[in-house]
Image: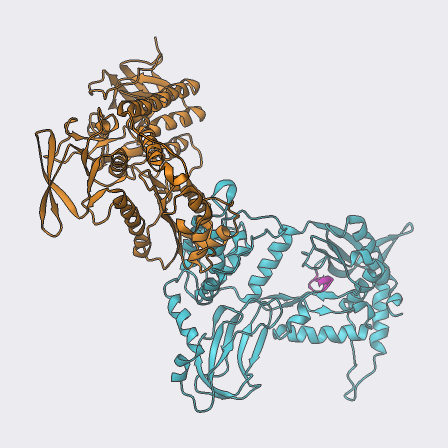
Chain colours: A cyan, B orange
């Protein structure tokens, strides 16, 4: 019997991924554990390993296909002694049918999987959709089912029925409008991104404003879509509140010098760690959250999620976007450990090789643009976090101490909070604790 | 000097026209309605309503004849044709008066006479030339008279009249239209009904129950050709059991009158010819729009096959001139006319309204057994490319139907296999004309099979069969 290889779920939340690259071709022999393909998910590129040995009989989903649903058949492996004709005779043939049906519905690129899902959906209940904040989206049962079958997000569709109810014609209009007609490879971006941009103008509406030929279209990759979706979701659902404070860095810089100066060296003479200001910022925020546990929370509709550890996400800018690997239980980790973790994260993030569990979750985040000379800025809360700290550059400023003007190295930080769970005063309290660690950094060492 | 300027003038006060007038007035438009003969139009004077009154008499007569089935006795059962007709006219008269009241209540001016659009924005009302059908309900009080009236929006709602086949023209004596059939001076002993649409079949059913020997001649292969063939087939079988005779795939080629009878020459599809004689004949071969003498031609209003051509909002090709109801094309049903009229004036008033959707207009036929339907028939659904799931539930499996002594009938539902959309529902049997609306609501709300299955239907009712039919489409039927 041929063995079906399906799109793996590389993380618990993964629903679809882009099949970036095949490392094998039809006819290649593979053994269990061989890397056969690369899959690009929300934020990372992951390798798919063969779990059985055999010959690659058929590659069903070609490289470069976007929006491949989890569990969709991507290739068929032949066991010893089988030839390609076995594919049609076996369950593997289920792959061929959806492909053929895809022709019928060119408007929906994921149709092959959508049809399979859809056929099942006729007996499965389609839950009533909710808006991001849990409000009900009024929609007809038929519209819900059509949306589900066609992979549309009802949130993105404006209803024309009574009181804005989403009805069949709205789904048909959504399918018919530009997005659906795009080339199969490019279409998933439109289909997936459009739902996120609930009220934004359509691709057509935007392109109409520019002369044809005066631009280049770069289809979104998984990361860009995720960034867009998450940030829109954040700004639409989280009431942001901002608190800023100036922190004097001189003591911290002096301590950092001492720490790095006394770092043990390996056999090649390289220091075993080199703590950065950012590493110390991570630690300070982690400790501040430990001290002000009411701010170390996540919002849910039913309850406040009070976290027992400070898992600090750190925004790492990489080509084409950014990613936020998480330093877990940072309040417990020595600076040297945090520093080395961050080095490893930074390197692997740029290669897009972070594992989902390394960037999903977290209780807060730090975004540092100090190295780019930014004085201060406000960051967007990345749920399930309730806070994010935007860190500016440390530079020498005139500071009034007592009645004297003196020079101090000062860094401005701005804490963005989800006001639903971290009120203004609580945010200020957290920031005061943070400032305390930054200005009296010895506290971070004990 | 009477005010002759309006926002909206509607020509014709049938169910389409008068409902449109009320809605227009509700929307703050100054509205007048022109009528030449009877408020309420054919529907409540010579159509839907008085036939229901006649059919009710027939139904009760039928039950009295079958009193024994229910453990009752009724001897020497008879009827008085004049009294049956009188009751029907009384019902019609009551509603006719009601429309007059509604016009007054809604501040709609009624202009009595024949309306003609003499130019854009102008309706000239002149003396009625059409011979009125008798008995005539009295002209309402306080109506305006002949003259020139102006309105920015003119809505033609003049309805339709019986289609006439050349050579078989109704004469009102031997060959009737629905007008004469509504007020028979006596019950004919035998009757030929030409056409088995809703009108033909209802009169056939009525006269059969009242004792006449009735033969129905239909050109199409099935009776009630717009209905699902499975349903109309069952209806036919039941009516045949009652003694009705049907000739399908049959055409009346010649009619000879004389000697107190009508003799029709009928050609059947197999090339055979036969002669059928009866005391009377009803011509019920459809209706045609009343598009004449309205000035439409002079204004260049587009018409097609006897009807005004409109868009989904009742707009003709000429600005300011609208049409709704029968005169604007099929399906020629009162409820379609009403809805079309409401959409038309709401659009005029600038409301955000959706174009008429003709795919969900129910149809009801009040013969015995009743037939009701909405949406696509099974053949039509397949023709449209749907892969369908069909559910059926017979009256025989329903407790209430058995208790009523009405075990004959069927409820059929048609779903799109892919989406679970309810594409059509078709019924034959007792009271189905009152049941169909449940499916009409379901279709309008775009429910799928899932929601229908999750809906609680009261027990014991005939409506339980609706749910069972849905369940059957998905292999989950309970009571058969």
Question: Residue A67's spot in the image, x, y percent?
Answer: 50, 67
Question: Residue B451's spot in the image, x, y percent?
Answer: 50, 51
| Residue A194 placement, left or right of A213 | right
Q: Nearer the viewer, residue A309 or A380?
A: A309
Q: Residue furthest bottom?
A: A81
| Extent of the magenta region | A362-373
Q: Nearer the viewer, residue B475 or A105?
A: B475
Q: Would residue A254 be visible to someone looking at this image?
A: yes
- Answer whether residue A51 is magenta in the image: no
Q: Quadrant of residue A225?
A: bottom right
Q: Which residue appears at 40% of the width and 87% of the height?
A: A83
Q: Looking at the image, is A337 positioned above or below residue B338?
A: below
- Answer whether residue A367 is magenta in the image: yes
Q: How many marks?
A: 0
Q: Quadrant of residue A111?
A: bottom left
Q: Looking at the image, is A82 positioned above or below residue B394?
A: below
Q: Which residue appears at 42% of the width and 27% of the height?
A: B23
Q: Quadrant of the C terminus of chain A?
A: bottom right
Q: Would residue B446 be visible to someone looking at this image?
A: no
Q: Nearer the viewer, residue B360 or A357?
A: B360
Q: Which residue appears at 27% of the width and 25% of the height?
A: B81
Question: Residue B326's spot in the image, x, y percent?
Answer: 28, 34
| Residue A310 placement, left or right of B199 | right
Q: Residue furthest right?
A: A402
């Amino acid at each position: 019997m041929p063995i079906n290889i399906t799109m793996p779920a590389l993380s618990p939340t993964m629903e679809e991924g882009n099949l970036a690259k095949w490392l094998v071709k039809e006819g290649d022999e593979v053994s269990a554990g061989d890397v056969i393909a690369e899959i690009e998910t929300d934020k990372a590129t992951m390798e798919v390993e063969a779990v059985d040995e055999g010959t690659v009989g058929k590659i069903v989903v070609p490289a470069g296909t976007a929006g491949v649903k989890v569990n969709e058949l991507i290739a068929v492996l032949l066991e010893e002694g089988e030839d390609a004709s076995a594919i049609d005779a076996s369950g593997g043939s289920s792959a061929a049918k959806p492909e053929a049906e895809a022709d019928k519905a060119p408007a929906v690129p994921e149709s092959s999987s959508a049809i399979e899902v859809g056929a099942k959906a006729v007996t499965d209940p389609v839950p009533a959709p909710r808006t991001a904040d849990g409000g009900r989206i009024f929609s007809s049962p038929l519209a819900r089912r059509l949306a589900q079958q066609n992979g549309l997000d009802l949130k993105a569709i404006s209803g024309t029925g009574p009181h804005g109810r989403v009805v069949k014609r709205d789904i048909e209009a959504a399918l018919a409008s530009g997005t659906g007609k795009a080339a199969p490879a490019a279409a998933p971006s439109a289909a997936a991104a459009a739902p996120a941009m609930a009220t934004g103008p359509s691709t057509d509406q935007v392109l109409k404003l520019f002369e044809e030929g005066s631009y280049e279209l770069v289809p979104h990759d998984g990361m860009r879509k995720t960034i867009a979706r998450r940030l829109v979701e954040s700004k639409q659902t989280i009431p942001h509140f901002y608190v800023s404070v100036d922190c004097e860095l001189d003591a911290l810089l002096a301590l950092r010098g001492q720490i790095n100066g006394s770092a043990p060296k390996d056999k090649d003479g390289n220091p075993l760690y080199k703590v950065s200001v950012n590493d110390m910022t991570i630690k300070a925020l982690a400790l501040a959250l430990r001290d002000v546990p009411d701010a170390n929370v996540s919002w849910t509709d039913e309850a406040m999620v009070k976290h027992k550890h400070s898992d600090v996400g750190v925004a790492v800018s990489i080509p084409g976007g950014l990613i936020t690997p998480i330093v877990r239980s940072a309040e417990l980790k020595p600076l040297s450990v945090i520093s080395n973790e961050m080095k490893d994260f930074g390197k692997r993030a740029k290669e897009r090789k972070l594992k989902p569990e390394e960037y999903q979750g977290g209780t807060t985040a730090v975004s540092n643009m100090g190295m780019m000379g930014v004085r201060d800025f406000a960051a967007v809360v990345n749920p399930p976090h309730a806070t994010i700290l935007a860190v500016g550059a440390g530079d020498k400023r005139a500071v009034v101490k007592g009645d004297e003007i003196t020079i101090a190295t000062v860094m401005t930080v701005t804490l963005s909070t989800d006001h639903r769970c971290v009120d203004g005063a609580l945010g200020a309290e957290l920031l005061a604790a943070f400032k305390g660690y930054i200005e009296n950094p010895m506290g971070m060492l004990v | 000097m009477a005010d002759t300027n309006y926002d909206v003038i509607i020509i014709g006060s049938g169910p389409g026209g008068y409902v449109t007038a009320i809605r227009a007035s509700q929307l703050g438009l100054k509205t007048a309605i022109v009528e030449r003969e009877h408020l309420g139009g054919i529907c409540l004077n010579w159509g839907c309503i008085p036939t229901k009154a006649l059919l009710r008499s027939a139904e009760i007569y039928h039950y009295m004849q079958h009193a024994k089935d229910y453990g009752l006795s009724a001897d020497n059962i008879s009827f008085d044709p004049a009294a049956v007709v009188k009751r029907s006219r009384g019902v019609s008269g009551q509603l006719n008066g009601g429309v007059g009241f509604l016009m007054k209540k809604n501040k709609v001016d009624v202009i009595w006479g024949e309306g003609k659009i003499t130019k854009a924005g102008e309706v000239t009302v002149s003396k009625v030339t059409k011979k009125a059908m008798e008995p005539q309900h009295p002209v309402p009080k306080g109506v305006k008279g002949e003259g020139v009236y102006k309105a920015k929006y003119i809505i033609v709602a003049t309805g339709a009249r019986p289609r006439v086949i050349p050579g078989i023209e109704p004469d009102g004596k031997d060959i009737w239209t629905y007008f004469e059939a509504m007020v028979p001076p006596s019950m004919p002993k035998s009757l030929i009904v030409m056409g088995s649409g809703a009108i033909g079949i209802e009169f056939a059913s009525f006269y059969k129950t009242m004792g006449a020997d009735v033969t129905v001649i239909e050109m199409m292969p099935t009776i009630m050709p717009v209905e699902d063939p499975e349903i109309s087939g069952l209806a036919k079988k039941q009516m045949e059991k009652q003694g009705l005779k049907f000739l399908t795939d049959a055409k009346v080629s010649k009619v000879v009158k004389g000697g107190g009878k009508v003799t029709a020459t009928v050609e059947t599809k197999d090339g055979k010819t036969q002669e059928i004689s009866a005391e009377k004949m009803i011509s019920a071969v459809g209706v045609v729009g009343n598009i004449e003498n309205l000035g439409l031609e002079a204004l260049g209003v587009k018409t097609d096959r006897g009807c005004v051509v409109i868009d989904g909002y009742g707009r003709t090709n000429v600005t300011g001139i609208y049409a709704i109801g029968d005169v604007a094309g099929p399906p020629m049903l009162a409820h379609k006319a009403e809805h079309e009229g409401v959409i038309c004036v709401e659009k005029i008033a600038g409301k955000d309204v959706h174009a008429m959707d003709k795919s969900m207009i129910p149809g009801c036929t009040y013969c015995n057994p009743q037939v009701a339907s909405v949406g696509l028939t099974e053949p039509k659904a397949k023709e449209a490319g749907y892969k369908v799931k069909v559910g059926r539930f017979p009256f025989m499996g329903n407790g209430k139907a058995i208790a009523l002594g009405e075990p004959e009938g069927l409820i059929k539902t048609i779903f799109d296999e892919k989406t679970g959309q309810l594409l059509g529902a078709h019924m034959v049997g007792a009271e189905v004309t009152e049941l169909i609306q449940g499916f009409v609501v379901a279709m309008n709300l775009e429910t799928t099979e899932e929601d229908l299955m999750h809906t609680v239907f009261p027990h014991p009712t005939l409506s339980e069969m609706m749910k069972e039919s849905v369940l059957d489409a998905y292999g989950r039927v309970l009571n058969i």
